[in-house]
Image (cartoon, rainbow, N blue to C red):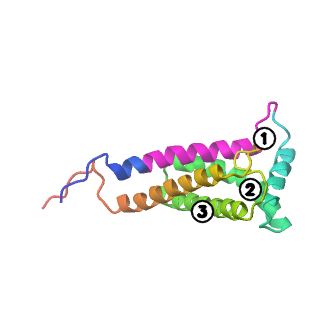
Amino acid sequence: MMPSSPLNLRRAIIWIGRLVLAGIFIYAGYAKLTMGMRPRPPLGVALSFFALQVDSYRILPSWGVKWVAHTLPFAEIGLGLLLLIGWRFRIWATLVTLIMLGFFAAVVRSYALGMQINCGCFATPEPLTIKTVMRDGALVALALLMTIFAFIEARRPHPWTAPEKA
């Protein structure tokens, strides 16, 4: 069996996906905690404002809004760091892809209903437009490709391992 090359298109997409999505997740989580302000507002204030953005989608009950607002920023930062580190990568890539699909479904639903709300993606007053839908769709596609390719690459021998002796 011929070993695979150290760099191919799949591995390049995995690395690009890791770096891009990790950066976006870390930045989005941090932005939700700081609201993009200097000096940083108290954590409770930032989470309350984020809860208002989550509630504007009108998908979750009040206890769900509170739970998402208080856990999502920390989960985004943690998942971003785990993507960068690469430990148990396929697990975290799958989880990031599922979260991105959930974000995308919420954004598409709200856009289709004509809701005039802020995205809430980066804790800035960004209106929900077709640009937001396209951006989130591209990020979902990148996350899907990254995850699928990570599972495909896991089935192949590592390019730097010694070849099997006959």
Amino acid at pointer 2: Thr
Magenta span includes 58: no
Q: CA distance from mark 3 to mark 2?
A: 18 Å
How packed is label 1: few (under 14 Cα within 10 Å), some, or many (20 or more)? many
Tell which circle, 3 or 1, labels the residue nearer the N-terminal end. Answer: 1
The residue at the point 42 percent across, 58 percent down is: 150
Secondary structure under the numbered disc 3 in the rendered image: helix
Q: Secondary structure at mark 1?
A: loop
What's the CA distance linking mark 3 and mark 1? 24 Å
The reply to whether discs 3 and 2 touch (Cβ–Cβ < 8 Å) is no
- 104 vs 32: above or below: below
User: Which residues are the magenta region?
Assistant: 14-39
Which residue in the structure is indicated by mark 2? 71
Q: Earlier in the sequence, mark 2 or mark 1?
A: 1
In contact (CB < 8 Å): disc 3 and disc 1: no
Q: Earlier in the sequence, mark 3 or mark 2?
A: 2
Q: Main secondary structure of the magenta part?
A: helix
User: Label 1 is placed on what type of residue?
Assistant: Met
**Label 2 Cα crowd, 10 Å radius (few <14 / some 14-19 / many 20+):** few
Q: Secondary structure at mark 2?
A: helix
Q: Pointer 3: what residue?
A: 101
Q: Residue at x 29, y 57 (%)?
A: 157
Which residue is farthest left? 166
The image quadrant where one finds the C terminus is: bottom left
Give the tally of numbered discs.
3
Residue wearing tag 1: 35
Of the pair 64 and 126, the residue shown nearer to us: 126
Relative image position of residue 118 (x, y in whole percent): 77, 50
- Of residues 80 and 121, which is closer to you in this image? 121
Marks 3, 2: nearer the viewer = 3
